[in-house]
Image (tube, rainbow, N blue to C red):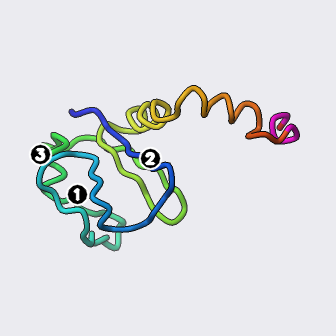
Amino acid sequence: MPEARIWIPSVLDHKANTGYALYPGVMSSVGDLKISSRGQMSLPANARHRWGLDEGGTVGYLDIGEAIVIVPGGVEQLRSALLGAVSDPDWEAARAGFGDADLANE
């Protein structure tokens, strides 16, 4: 199964045609997924092929309120990708409360 790669922009731009892709090659960047009355949905075939899930497998998801992030490999792969995307200076800024001493003590 391929390693999950996550692109985290420095400024979230929420534009559909930014030209960024997590994976190279031809892929549909937009589409609708049908959800059954039992909550089931199908992952598009091009994503299943690219992620090596043709025979089935595990994906991880993260509900961020207005959207859900789905990555191949399950929750541990998702956690690893997210933690790897945060730089050491960003971790230090978070530990320091982003300049707010009260926040640093929380």
Mark drawn on residue 54? 3
Confirm whether the magenta stretch covers residue 89.
no
- Amino acid type of disc 2? Ile
Badge 1: few (under 14), some or many (20 or more) residues near its Cα, within 10 Å? few
Image coordinates of residue 96 in percent, x first then y, are 76, 32
Residues at marks 1 and 3, CA–CA distance in whole angstroms: 10 Å
Image coordinates of residue 2 in percent, x first then y, are 22, 34
**Residue bearing mark 1:** 43
- Which corner quadrant of the image does residue 94 belong to? top right
Residues at marks 1 and 2, CA–CA distance in whole angstroms: 22 Å
Which residue is at a point 60% across and 29% down the rendered structure image? Answer: 89
Badge 3: few (under 14), some or many (20 or more) residues near its Cα, within 10 Å? few
Mark drawn on residue 8? 2
Image coordinates of residue 102 in percent, x first then y, are 88, 40
Q: Earlier in the sequence, mark 1 or mark 2?
A: 2
Q: Is residue 33 above or below residue 98?
A: below
Image coordinates of residue 22 in percent, x first then y, are 28, 47
Q: Earlier in the sequence, mark 3 or mark 2?
A: 2
Question: Is 89 left, or right, of 54 in this rendering?
Answer: right
Q: Is residue 22 above or below residue 86?
A: below
The magenta-colored residue range is 101-105
- Amino acid type of disc 3? Asp
